[in-house]
Image: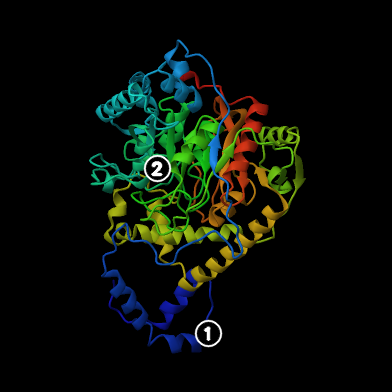
Amino acid sequence: MSDTPITEADIEAAERLAGLSYTARERAQMVGNLEGQIDLARARRQVELAHNVPMASRFDPRLPGFAMPTQSGVRVAAEDAALPGSDADIAFASLPQLSGWIASGALSSRRLTQIYLDRIAKLNPHLHCFACVTTDLALSEADAMDALTAQGRHLGPLHGIPYGVKDLFDTKGIATGWGAEPYQHRLPETNAHIVTLLREAGAVLLGKTTLGALAYGDVWYGGVTRNPFNLNEGSSGSSAGSASATAAGLCAFSIGTETLGSITSPSQRCGTTGLRPTFGRVGRSGGMALCWSLDKVGPICRGVEDTALVLDALNGPDINDLCSIAAPFAYDAGRDISGLKLGYLPDAFGEGATAVDHAALAAAKELGIEVVEVHLPDLPYGALLNVLYSEAAAAFEHLTLSDLDDALTRQDDGAWPNIFRKARFLSAVDHVQLDRLRYLVMQALDGLFQEVDALIGPFSTGPMLVASNFTGHPCLHLRAGFEMLSTRGSGSLATGRLTAAPKDEAGEKFRVPQGISLWGRLFDEGTILCLGRALEAKLGVASERPSLAE
């Protein structure tokens, strides 16, 4: 950092970065007393902030007067299918089916685990969806679950069920590299909160699924994670490996995280069912922090009810997560949905919406529920992205200040290194004002959900992807159909806005899945799950597998 005195010309040049305009007199008044502010910033940078130190300010999605739901308990539809003869059919079975077969003794956890390990060995070289496969641990845990089954003990619906966890959650003694070169050889000494919960529920850890470096995209230190329906394109991200592995039948379910689309975007690309719970419902301790006020943890599965079972295991307070909120979770497959009111934003089904989006809306109107137009206030929802940039740049400040960001594979304009550097020029005053704008957005969505029980819409058109991530409302993204599309690139934040993935319009077309999103009230995931299950059955496209997975 230069020791050259600050001049009025420096201030005038800096005004452009802040979008401000001062007078010559105002610059002259400032020029002699800016050093104090800079010295304070330098002093703060001398304090080493470990990655697990949170912000003191705690985001809470609940507005004054919020009434927490009181019902709890999960009841899924009965599944009594016979055990298939094909390993592939077993691999793609639903969680209720797998759970029933294990509980009855028709299927052992070891056999199921070996089926998935064999599929990983065969397909991971093409998909690059597992950063680490924990073969010995998985078989040991499977044997332990089978021993309990033989004793007549059953830990619940995830007993003996193999899964993959996004490689930003700590696993004791197992490398947790966050998808990024500087952390590739991290060796945690403890398990993340959710890893402990899943072990207590009887789930079997197959390994660590890939993520785009530092939870952005699908490019990681081992390459690009691929979409099982088109190996020429990435799986999207950042829960890249979780969606790819689940879609290809390499695990029974997986765990992802979302800050801005990282569960829903790869689910859209790979055709999985992703559930992004209400902010604060699932504890995050032992997980990589990207944005303390935005990060959420949720399941990626192949069916709606599967996500309910996994969320039930993950739900509960985390004493080491400052933003953790204790809340009951209820889902009942037998619930009558006929009295529900489903809203949609007309503009979201305008330009950019596809035939699959419109077909999903039409199918929703045939569910025997009321479907109505709703509207949101005209607010600059996209402006909230500067909150994400600020928090992410703070979380990885040491990379920027030490130039370790040069070690990251992805270095384009929309990649983290450039975003982190640009974020240093964001104004603290504007950041406070953004927090106040966020409150207005919270009020706007609260008003919307006073009109309807849930909202339906395309994944990326309209304001809901951004708005709901910043308000903390839950989202269920499920497969709605297929399109013939040429190979797609990756979305980008290069311009400061979230831009869609470009397509190679002249290239070969591939049959790829597309989904639809359902958003619900805070801590009311049960309603969107019931609607999602009905819509899933109506659309009838959830069971199609990628050809390479057979």
Image quarter in which the N terminus is found: bottom left
In this rendering, does residue 488 appear at all? no
Give the percent coordinates (x, y) of residue 341. Answer: 73, 44
Q: Nearer the viewer, residue 274 or 325?
A: 325
- Disc 1 crowd, CA 10 A, few/some/many (<14, 14-19, 20+): few
Q: CA distance from mark 2 to mark 1?
A: 45 Å
Circle 1: residue type: Thr
Task: Tell whether 451 sits left or right of 129.
Answer: right
Q: Which residue is mark 1?
A: 23
Task: Tell whether 186 sits left or right of 202.
Answer: left
Q: Secondary structure at mark 1?
A: loop
Give the percent coordinates (x, y) of residue 456. Answer: 66, 42
Tally the numbered discs. 2
Snapshot quadrant of residue 321: bottom left
Give the percent coordinates (x, y) of residue 442. Answer: 60, 60
* Labels 2 and 1: the sequence-earlier one: 1
The structure residue drawn at horizontal position 39% and vertical position 42%, both measured from the top left corner, is 212
Q: Which disc is residue 212 wearing?
A: 2
Q: Which disc is residue 104 wearing?
A: none
In this rendering, does residue 347 appear at all? yes
Q: Secondary structure at mark 2?
A: loop
Q: Nearer the viewer, residue 4 or 157?
A: 157
Circle 2: residue type: Gly
Task: Tell whether 401 sits left or right of 84.
Answer: left
Q: Nearer the viewer, residue 231 or 7?
A: 231
